[in-house]
Amino acid sequence: MDRRGAARGEDRREVGRVAAHGRGLSAVVLSGGRGSRLGGVSKAALRVGGVALLDGVLDALAAAGVRDVVVVGDPPSPDRATRPGVRVTREDPPFAGPLAAVAAGLDLVPDGEHEVVLLACDLPRSPALLALLLEDEAERSDPAAPGAGRAVVDAAGRTQWLAGRYAVGPLRAAIDAVRAERGTLEGASLRAALARLELERVPDRGGASLDVDTPEDLAAAGRCHDPSMDETSGTPDQPETTRRERRAGHAGTHRPWWHRSVVYQVYPRSFADSDGDGVGDLRGITSRLDHLAALGVDVLWLSPVYRSPQDDNGYDISDYTDVDPLFGDLAAMDELIAEAAKREIGIVMDLVVNHTSDEHAWFAESRSSRDNPKRDWYWWRPAREGFEPGTPGAEPTNWGSFFSGSTWQLDEATGEYYLHLFSRKQPDLNWENPEVRQAVYAMMRWWLERGVAGFRMDVINLISKHVGEHGELTDGAPRADGWGNGAPFYTDGPRMHEFLAEMHREVFDPFPGTYLTVGETPGVTLEEARLYTDPERREVDMVFQFEHMGLDHGVLGKFDPVPLHLPDLKANLARWQDGLATAGWNALYWNNHDQPRIVSRWGDDGEHRVASAKTLGTILHLHRGTPYVYQGEELGMRNAGFTALTQYRDLESLNVAGDAETMGMSTEHLLAGLAYMSRDNARTPVAWDDSPNAGFTTGTPWLSLAPGWERINAAAERANSDSVFHHYRRLVALRRGAAAGQDGIDDGVAALVIDGAFALLAPEHERLWAFTRTLETEGGPREALLVVANLSGEPLEVDVAAELGDAVVLEGASVLVASHADAYGDAAVPDGGAHLALRPWESVVYRLAVRAA
């Protein structure tokens, strides 16, 4: 069988798998024909289920027991018009647009039918038609124009499913509502109607899931059927999961959906303010979702918005099932989830369950008396033997808090101390108590039912403490501030894996492969991380480790920074690449709400701000793992630039200022450390434009704007095609097979970026960062990417053979992504590939010529 015949066979099987859920249903089929026109676009570009011949579709539907088939857009030839037991209705009305086509088909569905199958596929071969199907008229100028379709694939190719089953009544009502608003269906998109259905589906009737392919899958595969997704995505007894839950992939396949995803973190109070109080909120986030969609990300990690006294900016939670009025309410949360889902963005909640607020109802009960039923929900201990409660040294252990001072706070009413690894207003939950665990799991299920796509679990590896036979906790070695280092006794404790496995069984097992779970694990070792993230163990999907974030910490800790030694950073990330290569998965990040801006920390936020921001992003995104982008990182935002202690709001920063004298830090030393490392550097409001207060708020921002916001803002970045923003868009698109300067989708590029083996080159070079990503196929060609970057403000000459090794051959290579726009094209590989001349902070990603394995 030739390649074309094999593809048709695959496609027919795919249609059969989809149609297997259609027994007793009607089908509306959008079909193409020679020479016809559909809304100004050749219908020859549109096929159903990836099948080039319509009779293959009709056969599959008939075999599945579909009673009525309405073929819209191309009257079948006589030999296609009949099928035993099936009524085939042909219609080719004068309409413009796919929604009008669906409406015409629905008009022919017999009364009494309750569900309908919509099938349309093979769209990557026609980007212009993809534009027509997915984009409202106002969002596209001329979808048939050369190049316009490709932009739509990059920016919006994940915004609408192209195969699905819907209830006829609500679908008709949604279409009627669009018609009433517009006065016509001409030019209206399928998205305009289907969005009104809140992206919900009629439950499947057993067998494989009807959710066959997303446009992201189609774009990455280049055809409707993706051979990497041959396995069915469920079993008859599995609960149905919606498109919103399943996200961009299929449960049960060999590649989890989040392997091809990019996560964007939003710190709500600093993202966008909708009500003018100076603090960002949920409706502000919703109003800026199109920015995330344009960037191309498909997961939004939302820092805590739960009800909270805000002692630690929301990481002190007083009610897990409510939204703090500072950010809105549950209705605003539901709106955010729904609006994000329309853009194929899932919401990942920040789960903070190592501790609660001291104002949580659980703690209020726990502290009310020593015999309260919830007393053991938290860690309570008497004063150290021989000491009076409240006197120096009476604390049950000498552990020092993450936020300075002791980890123990005396409760005067009951005469005992409670444990708080962080603020005194953040008492630690006692996970040894099964009632605590079950309460947490119930809360998690409540949020999943509300529509979130998973959880980022705050300091999750601290929930298991090392407890002695009689409940005792052990003192730690002294640290610089005079307290003890308790980390060995509460990090990666003896029951961690038990707790996480139990959580997975209780919360996620009913929905395999559906939700994202990522654990923040300070102090985790590579060996422990491999256990946490091994898919066979079913604990978490990936972890945030902090080894690389501590490479510039001095003797006195993070606020005593030392210069970064680049070989150390390269070696550290390479070690994690190698360590999780065969089991587990890396979470890739430079920035988050707790880390300073990377362009100020390890880049050059002055003359080379743009180039260094691009290059640091390139390095991160080309490692193996799931990249995380923190708000403003895609704009090249800089540190806060504060020069006085009174400008800071961060609790950790203010607390360390109180300990500075004890630690022997001068005021000058302290302010320099805060300017470099304070968490407030990440928390300055996002600059959206150059209007007053950067478009963040109409009021007074809760924290000062970062310097240079008048020109470093989202509007300016999006208007400049050579900006940091558009470079990040190219990096995101690369994971889906879309390379800068190249037409179409290349699933080989996506496979290299996602799955390619990592190898560090020139490990001891103090300015050059270079590595390869390779895929070996048994008896087939060897595919490879090469990443080269100059991590300095001076030009760098690279002798390819001497620095990178004889195995790297640049002859015939092509450029996929580059930090400098003029690096694309024929001049990308100068001097026959023997030498590279890298400008300050320049980076290039090459696709090397295919060679025999």
Image (tube, rainbow, N blue to C red):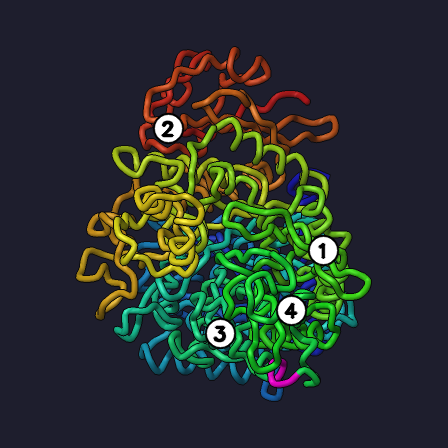
Q: Is the magenta stretch mostly helix, strand or loop?
A: loop
Residue type at the position of mark 1:
Gly
Amino acid type for the residue under numbered disc 2: Glu
Judging depth in this view, the residue of 656 and 329 nearest the camera is 656
Return the x and y of residue 104 as percentages of the image width and height.
47, 75
The earlier-in-sequence mark between 4 and 1 is: 4
**Helix, strand, or loop for circle 3?**
strand
Q: Which of marks 3 and 2 is nearer the N terminus?
A: 3
Which residue has dot 4 on it?
383
Nearer to us: label 4 or label 2: 4
Secondary structure state at the residue bearing disc 1: loop
C-alpha distance separating marks 4 and 3: 33 Å
Kind of element beneath mark 2? loop
- Say what amino acid the circle numbered 3 marks: Tyr
Query: Which residue occupies 55% across, 37% down?
Result: 623
> Would residue 477 appear left or right of 668 to someone viewing this image?
right
